[in-house]
Structures are given as structure tokens and as C-alpha cells.
């Protein structure tokens, strides 16, 4: 198992990794001193009982709770605005997100606007230190993933789509948690919470986590620290994903998936992604393809494209890039989902516009091999 103390030291996020950890939420939150908590989630988690357990634990610690359950998949500025209205009415002194990446990112967006004002587009990108220093501190957060995928609980970024244009914005605040940034004070990784995820959801988010490990390992701004996270994440995820898909009751596999997704999130925080994510975002925005599915379909073809230069940017994970691409295809095959874009309604006539959108994505600039729309069209063609 990776060194958890080193992980916490590098990411500044305290991590509790234990089955049943949700029952300790009140005790753990009380250590941060809140009296009023806005709990950000989605209706599905209310239905399976996770929210009742969380609220009971918080109330036992004499913490007043307001539930905002207006989060939906791929949160937009409209979802953030609804949560912001709830925050302004309730005036919390802490935010807790319980859910997948959508709930965690929406909570981050709410926190930014509640504390600093403005609109989500104002926080797009990675601002310099002097801009961050001018912002008010954000409220402390606890993030509790119920899927093993985005690793948002390790990151100072929130992915929020513009409700009108559907353009996905990476909004950030890289100040350390103690200085009021977007990373949480605490991440609770409880494999009991992932047990209720439908198989298709677990497959999509799991492939997304794997893509984070792979793309961060190859991106042009990787560092020695980020590469260590990428390697550890790949080592954990590549074995655990297959086990979790073959046996959903495998508690250790679900624990490992949560850990691997978090490690991959740490890798993103210390580096960035690449062309697979750049290609995936338009597939989600234009055609409604689930993000993890879109990334999983594109990743093998992006690996091959990047290795065509004669240099394998993923050598830390596998000395043979083609073998790595086939390994990703094999993992996707375990899910039973179709492996070609055409099965999801993508037509050849769509490729030019998709490629133009992909080339304009922020993550495209971090790909190890320079990409323009023409090259990305070829990658889409290979995946069609």
C-alpha cells in the first residue's frame, strides 16, 4: 500500500480511509469547530440512506444541518446558483459534500461564490498567487466520495459547466486548506458508501480514475512528486478495477478503488491531464456521453497518438505504449460496454466540430504531444 502519511503531507488534505468511517462524521467535523453545516448531495443518496446516516452523526455532535440536494450529474452554473441561494439563506460555517464528483465540485462552486462573490467564470483557470491573496478565505470543507472516480476530494479544482453554453470550466483556488483554498480539510474514504453504486456508474468512474493516473503520468508538466502519485494510483487501480467489476461485494477492491482514485486526484493536483480529457469534454457537452465513458473510449487512441512521436510518455507505467493501450482496452472490455464511439451516437459528420472544441480545451495544452484540431480529428476517427 502507498505511504498514506506521505500522501497527506504532499496534498495537505487529511484522509480517513476506513470502512464505516461515515459513522464518525460528527466527531470528525466537530474537530473543525462548525456549528452550522450545509450538506451538499443529490437525491439518489437520500434514497439509499447515506444522508440520513450523515445527518444523524452530525446532529449527535450538536451540529445544525441544512441539506441541499439540487446537484445533478455534470453540475452547471444553475446548480451552483441554487446551492448558493441555500447557503445565503442558511449561513453555514462549513460545507460537507457527500456524493460523487458532481456533488463535490458543486460544493466547491457554492463555497467560492458564497465567500468571494462574482460568477463561476471569474474563477476559471489557475490564477497567480497575488490574485489568490486578494480573495477572502473559503469555508472549511469535508468531502466524502460515494464513487471511486474523480478524486475531486484531493484537488483545488471544480469542474462546472456553463448552463447556457455547456462549456466546462475548471475553476480553482490553490491556497492550502488551512489558508481557505478549495481543497478540503478532510476527505473521508469509506468503501461502504460505494457499495450502492450501480455497476455502470462504478465502471465509468473507475475508468475515469484510471485515465487520471495515465494522463498525469504522461502530461508535459508532470513533476517527480506527481509521477509518484501517478505510478501508485496506476498500480492500485489497474488491479482493483478488474476485481471490483467481477465482484461488487469485494470490500477490499472497493477500498483500493477509493484509494487509487484519491492518489490519481493528488497526481492531477500536482500536474495536469491531457488530450483524452480534452476529447472527452465535447462528447459530454454535445452528445451527452457520460464523462467516464467518453474518457475511457478516447484514452487508448490518445496513448497511441502520443507514442507515434517515437517517445513513450507513459514509460513510468509501461515501457510499451501499445501494451498499455491494449491494457486499457482490456479493462474497458470487462465492463461489457461498447468500445467504439459510433455505438454512442457519434457520426463521422460530428468529428470536425468535436475536434475544434477539443483543441480549445484547457487540458489539450498539457498533452505531451502538441495537438491541433486536425490531429484530434484523427484521434476521434480512430475511436469511431
Image (tube, rainbow, N blue to C red):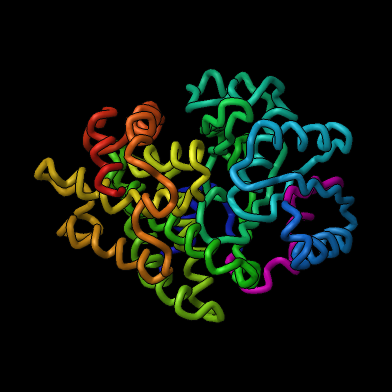
Q: In this orientation, which residue lies closer to the viewer: 257 or 359?
A: 359
Residue 22 on the magenta segment:
yes
Q: Is residue 251 visible?
A: no
Quadrant in the rendering for residue 161: top right
Q: Residue at x 82, y 49 (%)?
A: 67
Q: Is residue 88 visible?
A: yes
Q: In this orientation, which residue lies closer to the viewer: 191 or 137?
A: 191
Q: Residue at x 71, y 66 (%)?
A: 22
Q: Is residue 58 left or right of residue 180?
A: right
Q: Residue at x 57, y 24 (%)?
A: 132
Q: Is residue 151 above or below residue 253?
A: above
Tell me which segment is drawn in magenta. Answer: 17-41
Q: Is residue 72 left or right of residue 91?
A: left
Residue 67 on the magenta segment:
no
Residue 353, position as x, y percentages in the image: 38, 29
Q: Is residue 348 above or below residue 186?
A: above
Q: Residue at x 52, y 30 (%)?
A: 167
Residue 253, position as x, y percentages in the image: 48, 75
Residue 262, position as x, y percentages in the image: 49, 56
In the picture, the quarter occupied by the N terminus is bottom left
Q: Is residue 15 above or below residue 384?
A: below
Q: Is residue 181 left or right of residue 281?
A: right
Residue 268, position as x, y percentages in the image: 42, 45
Number of numbered markers: 0
Amino acid at each position: 500500500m502507498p505511504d498514506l502519511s506521505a500522501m497527506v503531507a504532499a496534498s495537505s488534505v487529511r484522509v480517513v480511509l476506513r470502512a464505516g468511517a461515515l459513522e464518525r462524521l460528527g466527531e470528525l467535523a466537530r474537530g473543525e469547530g462548525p456549528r452550522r453545516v450545509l450538506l451538499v448531495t443529490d437525491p439518489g443518496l437520500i434514497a439509499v440512506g447515506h444522508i440520513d446516516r450523515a445527518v444523524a452523526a452530525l446532529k449527535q455532535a450538536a451540529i445544525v444541518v441544512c441539506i441541499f440536494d439540487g446537484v445533478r450529474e455534470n453540475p452547471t452554473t444553475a446548480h451552483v446558483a441554487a446551492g448558493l441561494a441555500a447557503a445565503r439563506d442558511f449561513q453555514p460555517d462549513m460545507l460537507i459534500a457527500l456524493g460523487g464528483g458532481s456533488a463535490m465540485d458543486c460544493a466547491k462552486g457554492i463555497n467560492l461564490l458564497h465567500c468571494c462573490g462574482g460568477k463561476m467564470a471569474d474563477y476559471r483557470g489557475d490564477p497567480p498567487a497575488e490574485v489568490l491573496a486578494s480573495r477572502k478565505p473559503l469555508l472549511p470543507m469535508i468531502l466524502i466520495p460515494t464513487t471511486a472516480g474523480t478524486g475531486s476530494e484531493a484537488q483545488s479544482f471544480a469542474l462546472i459547466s456553463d448552463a447556457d453554453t455547456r462549456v466546462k470550466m475548471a475553476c480553482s483556488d490553490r491556497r492550502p486548506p488551512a489558508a481557505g483554498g478549495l481543497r478540503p480539510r478532510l476527505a473521508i474514504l469509506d468503501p461502504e458508501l460505494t457499495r450502492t453504486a450501480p455497476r455502470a456508474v462504478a465502471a465509468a468512474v473507475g475508468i475515469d480514475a484510471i485515465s487520471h493516473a495515465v494522463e498525469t503520468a504522461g502530461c508535459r508538466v508532470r513533476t517527480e512528486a506527481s509521477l509518484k502519485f501517478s505510478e501508485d494510483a496506476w498500480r492500485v487501480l489497474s488491479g482493483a478495477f478488474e476485481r471490483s467489476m467481477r465482484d461488487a461485494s469485494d470490500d477490499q477492491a472497493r477500498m483500493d478503488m477509493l484509494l487509487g482514485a484519491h492518489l490519481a486526484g493528488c497526481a492531477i493536483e500536482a500536474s495536469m491531464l491531457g488530450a483524452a480529457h480534452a476529447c472527452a469534454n465535447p462528447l459530454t457537452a454535445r452528445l451527452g456521453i457520460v464523462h467516464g465513458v467518453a474518457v475511457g473510449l478516447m484514452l487508448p487512441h490518445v496513448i497511441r497518438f502520443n507514442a507515434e512521436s517515437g517517445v513513450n510518455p507513459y514509460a513510468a507505467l509501461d515501457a510499451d505504449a501499445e501494451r498499455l493501450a491494449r491494457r486499457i482496452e482490456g479493462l474497458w472490455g470487462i465492463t461489457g460496454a461498447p468500445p467504439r464511439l459510433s455505438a454512442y451516437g457519434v457520426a463521422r459528420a460530428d468529428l470536425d466540430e468535436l475536434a475544434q472544441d477539443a483543441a480549445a480545451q484547457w487540458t489539450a495544452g498539457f498533452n505531451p504531444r502538441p495537438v491541433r484540431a486536425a490531429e484530434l480529428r484523427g484521434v476521434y476517427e480512430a475511436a469511431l
